[in-house]
Amino acid sequence: MDNWYSSPLLYQYLLENNTGACGTVRNKRKGMPTFPSKLAPGQCVSATTKDMMTCKWKDKRDVYMLSTVHKPKMTVTNKIDRFGNNVKKPQCILDYNANMGLIDKSDMQMSFNNTCRKTMKWFNRPERKIKGDFPTRLTDYHFLSRMQPLEGKSRIQKKCHVHSHTQLGAQCRKDTSFECKECGKALCLEPCFKDYHTKLKVKNQSLLKFVDTMKGGEKDHLDELLSRAIFTSATPFSIVENQNWLKFFKTLRPTYNPPSRKTISTTLLEKEYLRTYIKVYENILEAKVYAVQLDGWSNIRNESIMNIIVTTPKPFIFKSIDCGSNRHTAEYISAEISSVIEELGKEKCLGIITDNASNMKKAWKLLKADDKFKSLPIAYYSCVSHTLNLLMLDVVKVKTCFEIENISKAIIKNLISTHILKGLQH
């Protein structure tokens, strides 16, 4: 046990609770016996009671030990002194050194590295006692000028900055007609102008105005704006790991540290999704009427996707459905449309728009036959763009149009493959 805690009273308490103890102790603890003040190197003096033993041993310094598990016994060690004799140490000290914890070892190592001289703490230096001082006023060129009165007034006065903010004496109010335009401070002609530009103990504007700092919530707002820009522009999340971008952010705002790639892909992405979903949902609910548009296809991974768009008449992407193992059957499509209409309010729905596929038209019939929507004035019609696309496909199948298409393709192929013709386009 360390000497910070050791005492005869504590050891007696531990012993009564069937716990032995051994450790260094301070000689001025209450209950400690009086030992001789001077001992020869290697000499040991001990004192015992029925249950406790304490000793003083002279090494390089005096060492005081207290133990309830040892007897006053000296043990020969493997060390040899300068006279060739084996060094003897008290058994309690040998056991303590073998079993002492890291705290004692760290204290021992720190004791070998004391500072070589006394130093003054930086915050006790006289010039550091001024809070919020920005002493460019001591180095730049400044000139005293008379303040110009406002229109309709013969003179103007303001309170002197030095008299009202001085740390050299008692503060008071004193009006003056002079100012330092470079500092923007009203100052008396004598001696305040000189004191303000030559002495540090005058309050000035805060250093925080010249240091980039982040207020509460400001970093979270910047993280949201950055992540939103990344999401809406389809920028790779690795932008926050690119050294050139990090250098740009640090130059633009030194205090700002961009969020990690993991934070963007998890916390910020979920937060932005929730914000967008709530905003879209509120806009749709505020609309007097709406229409539902639906289309399905497979993505680049050949996964079945179905998107639902709600127009108010402003279009909103309301839902993107991963169909999984569900096929785009008429029953499945009608069930999805039905759930959307019931969620947004079937009384406000005026139309359902799909493409001209047979499964879509069959879904119309299922919805028209549904008792929930039978009495509602919902119009079912196909997408104009899809209809025009089908119309053009039929037109180009006509022989004349087919020949024109082939000639057009040949001309375009020639233009692209010939460098001179391609150059003329520019």
Image (cartoon, rainbow, N blue to C red):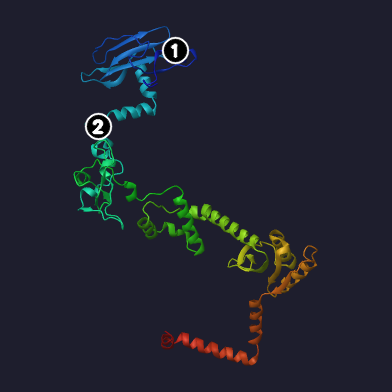
The residue that label 1 is drawn on is: 12
Residue nearest the observer in this picture, 258 or 33 = 258
Give left or right: position of 158 versus 53: left
What is the secondary structure assignment of the residue under circle 2? loop
Q: Does the CB distance between marks 2 and 1 fall below 8 Å?
A: no
Give the alpha-carbon distance from disc 2 to disc 1, as whole Å: 39 Å
Q: Does residue 129 sit above or below 339 in this rendering?
A: above
The percent position of residue 274, horizontal first and vertical second, equals: 58, 55
The residue that label 2 is drawn on is: 115
The percent position of residue 112, horizontal first and vertical second, equals: 27, 29
Residue nearest the observer in this picture, 146 or 77 = 146
Q: Residue drawn 36% across and 53% down?
A: 254
| Residue 292, image quadrant | bottom right
Where is the C terminus found, in terms of image quarters? bottom left
Where is the N terminus found, in terms of image quarters? top left
Give left or right: position of 85 versus 279: left
What is the secondary structure assignment of the residue under circle 1? helix
| Residue 133, image quadrant | top left
The percent position of residue 137, horizontal first and vertical second, equals: 23, 49
- N-terminal of the pair, mark 2 or mark 1, is 1
The percent position of residue 180, horizontal first and vertical second, equals: 24, 51
Q: Residue furthest bottom?
A: 400
Q: Does residue 4 sit above or below 199 in this rendering?
A: above
